[in-house]
Image (spheres, helix red, strand yellow):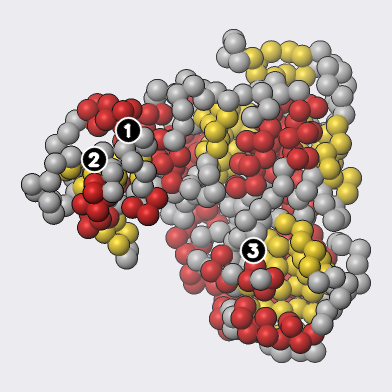
């Protein structure tokens, strides 16, 4: 078996890491990962023939093949390699986990930090036991800031990711009702997310905490922290000054001494009052529920000394994509597309925000929320009731989970799939309507607009 140091030396001489032969570049090291429906070991020879420098395998399928590195467990080897590379990075690593808003917060933080630092962030949502190592291994050694998104669905997973990524600082966006199938209940969610704070306590890192999230304030009470929110006791204070069609946020100039993190000294330093003025951030994000995501990015920027004007410009310029908090105009109608994923807490926030839009013709299209396990029926029933209680012209529910609790009325419809909905939708000839599209990834609500 090859020693970790020898494998890392090969990595530094390679053109990178690959786990999919379809994306292989010459000189990559191919890691033969396994999944429920695939075995990467079977593609190792193909990878070598396509130009991979080496193939890391945990099944000895090609005993006579050169440049095969045989290990006990390919995934664990990938994770150890990523941790070894992490130790070579002198820049700061900021971890982001939580039930909702991780990816948007990550992208906003990246936008803010890259105005002043060499910054790398998780691409897309490569945030799991495979994605985090791949992200770490893509980070150049000269990086000054790395923003790492961490996703988990079971206890101990966030703790394991922290051991790999060794974050210096971190954010838990919120604790909600995500992945109840794996976490079992909301306490499990809190404990799972809290593994990041447990690590930061050991590392003596700084937590960035929303003052609106009372459970997170309690969980971070014995940590170094910087807080953000709309309450006056926050370290950085903001308020919503507009939410339609896009969120607008004002961040206050507080009339007292301010603190920021001194990168050179590695400690807090006082700043004189009034050094930065108030800023108005006109975002391109739909929904008041994005307020905390914006404030988190502003807080991190402030902590690392990014000028407020640069913070404002970075957040204002950020344009969401990938079905997250997007506002789209099509065929004379306005669609709020927030359908990358959904759980009961994010669905509630989206519906309540949509209800506040001052327009007459509003329709909610809600897709199933997945990975809720035994909680599924109760949670779908609660969301269905919330939507029906609001004065939406139509309430449309998509998927089998909503179908189990759906009761028909004059304003509500149920479809099994988005394709059934699409046929009905074309017949309606809607014009000047506002739609909220919110559902889990597998429901594919965005296909209504294709």
Q: Nearer the viewer, mark 2 or mark 3?
A: 2
Q: Quadrant of the C terminus?
A: bottom right
Work out how far the residue at label 1 is from the one at label 2, CA to CA, in angstroms: 9 Å
In this view, the residue farthest toward the left is 64
- For label 1, the SS is loop
7 relative to 72, above or below: above
Which residue is at a point 60% across and 47% down the rendered structure image? 102
Residue 44 shows in the view: no
Work out how far the residue at label 3 is from the one at label 1, CA to CA, in angstroms: 38 Å
Residue situated in front as seen by the camera: 50 or 73: 50
Q: Earlier in the sequence, mark 3 or mark 1?
A: 1
Which residue is at a point 45% across and 39% down the rendered structure image? 135
The percent coordinates of residue 424 (x first, y second) are: 71, 86
The percent coordinates of residue 145 (x first, y second) are: 56, 27
Given contact means CB atoms under 8 Å apart, are the residues at marks 1 and 2 in contact?
A: yes
- For label 2, the SS is strand
Q: Earlier in the sequence, mark 1 or mark 2?
A: 1
- Quarter of the image for residue 218 reads top right
Residue denoted by label 1: 14
Residue denoted by label 2: 54
Q: Earlier in the sequence, mark 2 or mark 3?
A: 2
Q: Quadrant of the N terminus?
A: top left
Q: Residues within 10 Å of mark 1 (few under 14, many from 20)?
A: some
């Amino acid at each position: 078996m090859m020693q970790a140091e020898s494998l890392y030396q090969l990595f530094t001489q390679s053109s990178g890491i690959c786990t999919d032969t379809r994306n292989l570049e010459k000189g990559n090291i191919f890691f033969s990962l396994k999944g429920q429906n695939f075995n990467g070991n079977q593609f190792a020879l193909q990878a070598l023939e396509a130009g991979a420098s080496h193939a890391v395998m945990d099944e000895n399928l090609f005993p006579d093949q050169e440049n095969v590195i045989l290990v006990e467990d390919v995934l664990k080897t990938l994770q150890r390699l990523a941790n070894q590379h992490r130790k070579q990075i002198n820049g700061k690593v900021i971890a982001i986990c939580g039930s909702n808003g991780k990816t948007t917060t990550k992208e906003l933080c990246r936008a803010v930090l890259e105005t002043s630092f060499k910054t790398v962030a998780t691409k897309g949502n490569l945030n799991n036991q495979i994605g985090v190592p791949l992200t770490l291994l893509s980070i150049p050694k000269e990086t000054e800031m790395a923003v790492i998104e961490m996703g988990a669905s079971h206890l101990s997973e966030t703790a394991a990711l922290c051991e790999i990524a060794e974050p210096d600082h971190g954010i838990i966006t919120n604790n909600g009702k995500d992945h109840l199938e794996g976490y079992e209940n909301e306490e499990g969610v809190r404990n799972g997310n809290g593994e990041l704070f447990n690590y930061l306590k050991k590392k003596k890192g700084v937590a960035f905490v929303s003052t609106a999230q009372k459970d997170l304030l309690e969980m971070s009470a014995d940590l170094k922290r910087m807080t953000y929110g709309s309450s006056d006791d926050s370290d950085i204070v903001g308020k919503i000054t507009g939410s339609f069609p896009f969120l607008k946020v004002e961040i206050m100039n507080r009339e007292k001494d301010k603190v920021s993190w001194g990168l050179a000294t590695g400690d807090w330093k006082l700043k004189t009052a009034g050094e930065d003025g108030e800023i108005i951030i006109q975002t391109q994000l739909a929904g008041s529920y994005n307020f905390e995501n914006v404030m988190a990015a502003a807080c991190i920027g402030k902590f690392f000394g990014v000028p407020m004007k640069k913070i404002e410009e970075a957040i204002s310029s950020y344009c969401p994509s990938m079905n997250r908090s997007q506002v789209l105009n099509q065929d004379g109608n306005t669609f709020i597309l927030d359908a990358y994923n959904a759980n009961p807490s994010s669905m509630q926030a989206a519906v309540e925000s949509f209800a506040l839009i001052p327009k007459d013709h509003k329709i909610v299209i809600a897709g199933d929320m997945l990975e809720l396990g035994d909680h599924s029926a109760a949670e779908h029933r609660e969301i269905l009731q919330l939507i029906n209680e609001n004065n939406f012209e139509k309430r449309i529910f998509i998927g089998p989970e909503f179908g189990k609790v759906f009761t028909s009325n004059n304003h509500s419809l149920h479809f099994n799939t988005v394709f059934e909905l699409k046929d009905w939708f074309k017949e309606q000839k809607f014009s000047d309507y506002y739609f909220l599209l919110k559902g889990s990834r597998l429901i594919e609500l965005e296909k209504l607009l294709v």
